[in-house]
DNA sequence: CGGTACGTTGAGATCGGTCAAAGGTTGTGG
DNA sequence: CCACAACCTTTGACCGATCTCAACGTACCG
């Protein structure tokens, strides 16, 4: 495992800087993290539910998702991840993985040993804070998904998920225009929204017919962002990106 | 604000010790946290969505819940909390609250200033780790709720929630027998499971008719834990209580 | 003793699920 | 360059879990 690989870990530093202020020395320390690189094919498991994990995976390029299995073999997708995301920071403190993480496209992943994470966290409080913030922001996104599944109908759910993916791609600097990467199958959208693939298909057709979006080969085009956002009730505050903190009141 | 209030914060130390090992000095430091005590009536807001918060609430007795509002005024409950729980550790790092926390029963709450949290975290790595672990465990519970809402039918959802509340009460040392505290209205159960109060009522009747549980005035009795657990597909591993780590495999 | 909040009941509507099959697209190997 | 396989999307008919609305019963509290 090479001691430092220069700017291979750049996506991680970029991502953390979206939510936290990092000193130059913090960035240095992150670049210096020891890691093992891997190129994964779609569907490959990065972490499997029940595993005891001794390293922490960073997604450098491509897409990944977390998921959990239900009783009858049904699958629930818990989150989608893209370049720069920390895939299992939780496993740096919780020994047994409570869910799985899989590559969704071809993906470049860096595995960092738990011990190295622990060391850098101990040495640099700024990094500890950035990691903790990231954990908290992830939890906030999980909460929004609970609302999505519990209190929105099929069209709202899919619209909201679409808004979230668009917002994340913009922040990750993947796309800015009305066209976005869309590496998901309708079955994956179904597993993320608690619906069936058949129903997802029908809802997407309706959204296309209404001129809100169109989908092509692995591509999404948003024609009417205002309408998409309104239909979803999308408010990006829960993503906790810097400068997205609006509508604040003061309290004890 | 008194500098230390001896064992008033005992429930917090107890709770953290369920998931992390604390040195005696860590416990000392926790007992010494400055705080303001408050006795809250049912329904009182502890944190409100959109607030800028400069203190962190600890629940010393009673029950509380987190919730988030949807578009049409619909409410989704995100978590239930009981004695010892940290109610808004996230607000110690994320400035704007992305959801609300309310007292569910009469509740005793200690408010600790953000600055005091930050100081104790910086001085004692053991406490920092315990806080982070607690955050990660909360996120794990959110994930299980996503699965609950996305991939289980009404009876499974209610059964699972019941199992979770029972397990939490056991860990908090509130009850051990087949009788448990049940301070929830059917409307709150509905808001937590993504159902309507009417349907929750019918499902609870079915569960009583099947002899699995009975409910009385603010009390739940579990007659057939095995059947309840099986119907829910309940596996307590996601709660990350110590000694609940079973079914582990080894991985890179 | 009256009010308010909570629990219960019934009838009818609907959103989304199920099952099964047919079209498309993509990639691979001969 | 074609043929085939695998996977993904689309379609149709039917079904059923859960919602909606509206009323009635019940317990607690001042």
Image: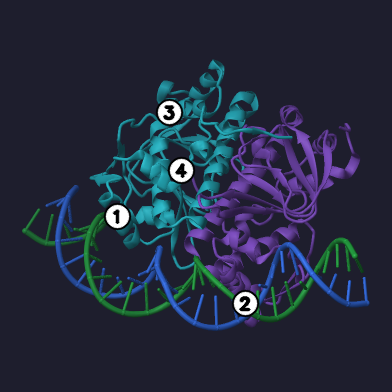
Chain colours: A purple, B cyan, C green, D blue
The residue lying at 43 percent from left, 47 percent from top is: B232
Categorize mark 4 by other alpha carbons within 10 Å: few (<14), some (14-19), many (20+).
many
Q: Secondary structure at mark 1?
A: helix
Quadrant of the image for the C terminus of chain B? top right
Res. B94 visible in picture: no
Q: Chain of mark 3?
A: B
Camera-side residue: B11 or B122? B11
- Chain letter of mark 2 equals A
How crowded is the residue under tag 3: few (<14 C-alpha within 10 Å), some, or many (20+)? some
Q: Which residue is mark 1?
A: B206
Describe residue A8's horizontal placement relative to residue A177 as left or right.
Answer: right
Task: Describe residue B130's horizontal placement relative to residue B5 as left or right.
Answer: right
For the residues marked 4 and 1, what is the alpha-carbon distance in whole angstroms? Answer: 19 Å
Task: Tell me the residue at 62%/74% (across/down).
Answer: A204
Label 2 Cα crowd, 10 Å radius (few <14 / some 14-19 / many 20+): some
Q: Distance from label 3 to label 4 (Cα)?
A: 26 Å
């Amino acid at each position: 495992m090479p001691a430092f690989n220069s700017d291979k870990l750049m996506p991680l530093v970029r991502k953390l800087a979206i939510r936290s202020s990092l000193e130059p020395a913090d960035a240095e320390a992150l670049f210096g993290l020891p890691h093992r690189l891997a190129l994964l094919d779609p569907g490959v498991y990065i972490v499997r539910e029940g595993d005891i994990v001794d390293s922490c995976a960073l997604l450098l390029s491509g897409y990944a998702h977390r998921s959990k299995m239900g009783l009858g073999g049904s699958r629930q997708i818990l989150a989608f991840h893209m370049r720069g995301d920390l895939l299992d920071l939780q496993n740096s403190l919780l020994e047994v993985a409570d869910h799985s993480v899989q590559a969704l496209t071809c993906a470049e992943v860096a595995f960092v040993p738990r011990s190295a994470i622990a060391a850098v966290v101990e040495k640099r409080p700024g990094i500890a804070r950035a990691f903790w913030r990231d954990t908290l922001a992830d939890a906030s996104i999980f909460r929004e998904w609970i609302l999505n599944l519990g209190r929105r109908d099929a069209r709202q759910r899919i619209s909201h998920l679409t808004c979230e993916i668009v917002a994340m791609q913009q922040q990750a600097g993947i796309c800015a225009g009305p066209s976005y990467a869309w590496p998901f199958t309708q079955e994956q959208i179904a597993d993320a929204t608690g619906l069936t693939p058949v129903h997802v298909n029908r809802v997407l057709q309706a959204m296309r017919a209404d001129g809100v979006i169109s989908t092509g080969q692995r591509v999404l085009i948003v024609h009417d962002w205002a309408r998409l956002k309104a239909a979803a009730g999308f408010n990006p505050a829960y993503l906790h990106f810097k400068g997205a903190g609006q509508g604040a009141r003061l309290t004890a």
